[in-house]
Image: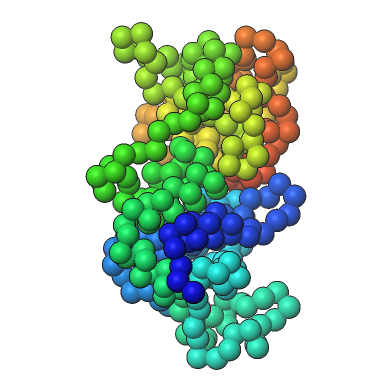
Amino acid sequence: MNTTREDFLRRIDDIKLWRRGNDRAPHKPLLLLFALGRVQRGEKRLARYGNEVAEDLKKLLRRFGRPRSVLHPEAPFARLRGDDLWEVIADTDLDRIRGKGGISHRQLVDHAAAGGFKEADQRMLLADPELIEQAARKLLGKHFPPSLHDSIRDAVRLARPVEQGLQPKAPTTRDRSFRHAVLRAYERRCVVCGFDVRLNDELVALEAAHIRWHSHGGPDQVRNGLALCILHHQTFDRGAIGLERATKGYRLVVSDEANGQSPAFHQLLDCHGKRIRNPQSARQRPDPNFVDWHRKQVFRGTPRDLENP
């Protein structure tokens, strides 16, 4: 059966993710974005798991996945076949030797497994560069917050829209409404550093961040939002900083995995353990459930020692 671009985008949209409570599992989206980057660069369709995929996918999971001590790049590589998007070939029938936990990393390496988009989909992507961008936008928009999109594109070497001569996707009305409500609640200043620069009375580099990501069920509500400058929005969404309950509000904590020598990093350390700005109304303070989600699903490492940050 001939595939169509609409069918391909539907399959991209319908990938089945591993589920356990509120845990996020971006393994398949990251592998697909990695593969889209390969197509865009004209690389061969099937990539060897052992020497072309595993380590790169591990790095992606470490940077953009849920904080975990053990990473499993083999899981999406083998399981994505069930979403009618991915083909894996090896020198044996992998399904015949799979264990109770599925096909292992060692099995994929030992049997020279190679994977990539199905042949018909690969041909269609090569003939339609815009389809690559549409698929990338779907994956990024559904599984990651906007603050991470460019970083993920760069990590998988997938060109940004402006680099392709395309228009970036316009923000939705929902985003503008959420931004306005959050910035108003926090008096249009970053809750961490107070940043409030204006250019001709227009705010510059101040954003409304979701505490629990919108892509993972976080609502567009003030209690799920923070007014953050670009620097603190990026570090919050990457898990370098987080929130901790304090008397009548929350305090900022810096991860023990974050490091640096620049003045900006030392300014960040100076904020460690200090209370963030409260919204105008106590009813607008962050919901503890959203803060708890961020701490478990995004924040990396453990908070630094308050006595010796």
Residue in view at x 32 percent, y 59 percent? 128
Q: Quadrant of residue 251?
A: top right
Residue in view at x 48 percent, y 49 percent? 138
Q: Position of residue 296 (x, y in %)?
A: 67, 44
Q: Position of residue 157 (x, y in %)?
A: 34, 56
Q: Image height check: is 39 above or below 277?
A: below
Between 187 and 124, the one lying in front of the other is 124
Left or right: residue 59 compared with residue 81: left
Between 239 and 96, the one lying in front of the other is 96
Q: Image height check: is 300 above or below 37?
A: above
Q: Which residue is the extreme one toward the front?
A: 1
Q: Position of residue 278 (x, y in %)?
A: 62, 15
Q: Is residue 306 visible?
A: no
Between 8 and 225, the one lying in front of the other is 8
Q: How many labels, in total?
A: 0
Q: Quadrant of the C terminus?
A: top right
